[in-house]
Amino acid sequence: MAIEPTWLKTARAKLGTKEAAGSANSSTILGWAQRLGTKVLGMIYNADSVPWCGVFVAYCLQNDGIDPAPIAVRATSWATWGQALRPERLAPGAILVFERKGGGHVGFYTGEDAAAYHVLGGNQGNAVTTARIAKSRCIARRWPEGRPVIGKPVQLAAGPKPLSKDEA
């Protein structure tokens, strides 16, 4: 595997983490929120039924000493965080922000095919997974300020995985 930023390695290590079923809450996800705190998240976060893609991204970045976006729990707050990347400059670990009905979504770039970005993110099917999300839904491509971009775009086959329609 190519050299990856530490925050992406942290994210990969969390693949498979799931929300708790029903009214229960995942102690892992709530632990991420507790570690980040109200000041970073912009709210008291106490239930994994509240969208947590921004919590996941903030946790992975903070684990590498990077300050998350203000009001990190809101996916769209990541659209102006860090420095902008052009699509041809993407590299594994870039933060991608998407629009969706009812809000936004944020996750990490791991590659792309002709139609979609392959995104490692939280709250994708109520778990940390890799999903294919249409490039046309992407509203921002970001990288942490002051960190060198490691790598380049990764071309992947679309495979049998369908496009994700709703990440909440």
Image (cartoon, rainbow, N blue to C red):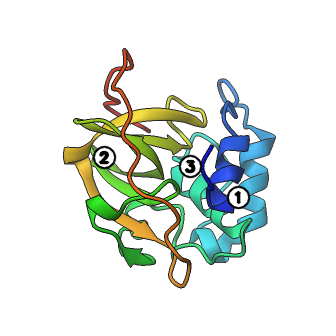
Q: How many marks?
A: 3
Question: Residue placed farthest to the bottom in the image?
Answer: 146
State whether residue 167 is above or below residue 162. below
State the mark number for residue 52. Answer: 3
Q: SS for tag 2?
A: loop
The first of marks 1 and 3 along the sequence is 1
Q: Position of residue 135 (x, y in %)?
A: 24, 45
State whether residue 142 is above or below residue 166. below
Q: Position of residue 42 (x, y in %)?
A: 56, 72
Q: Quadrant of the N terminus?
A: top right
**Type of amino acid at the residue the image marks with label 3:** Trp
Q: Residue at x 65, y 24 (%)?
A: 22
Tell me the distance, in whole angstroms, between the alpha carbons under discs 3 and 2: 14 Å
Nearer the observer, 144 or 113? 113
Locate residue 60: give its quadrant: bottom right
Q: Are marks 1 and 2 in contact (CB under 8 Å)?
A: no
The first of marks 1 and 2 along the sequence is 1
Q: Which residue is mark 2?
A: 102
**Type of amino acid at the residue the image marks with label 1:** Ala
Nearer the observer, 104 or 63? 63
The first of marks 3 and 2 along the sequence is 3
Q: Are marks 1 and 3 in contact (CB under 8 Å)?
A: yes
Question: Residue placed farthest to the top in the image?
Answer: 160
State whether residue 119 is above or below residue 73. above
Q: Residue at x 72, y 75 (%)?
A: 65
Q: Which residue is mark 1?
A: 33
State the mark number for residue 143. Answer: none
Q: Position of residue 32 (x, y in %)?
A: 74, 55
Q: Residue at x 59, y 67 (%)?
A: 43
Locate residue 7: give its quadrant: bottom right
Q: Are marks 3 and 2 in contact (CB under 8 Å)?
A: no
Q: From the viewer's perspective, is 80 left or right of 39?
A: left
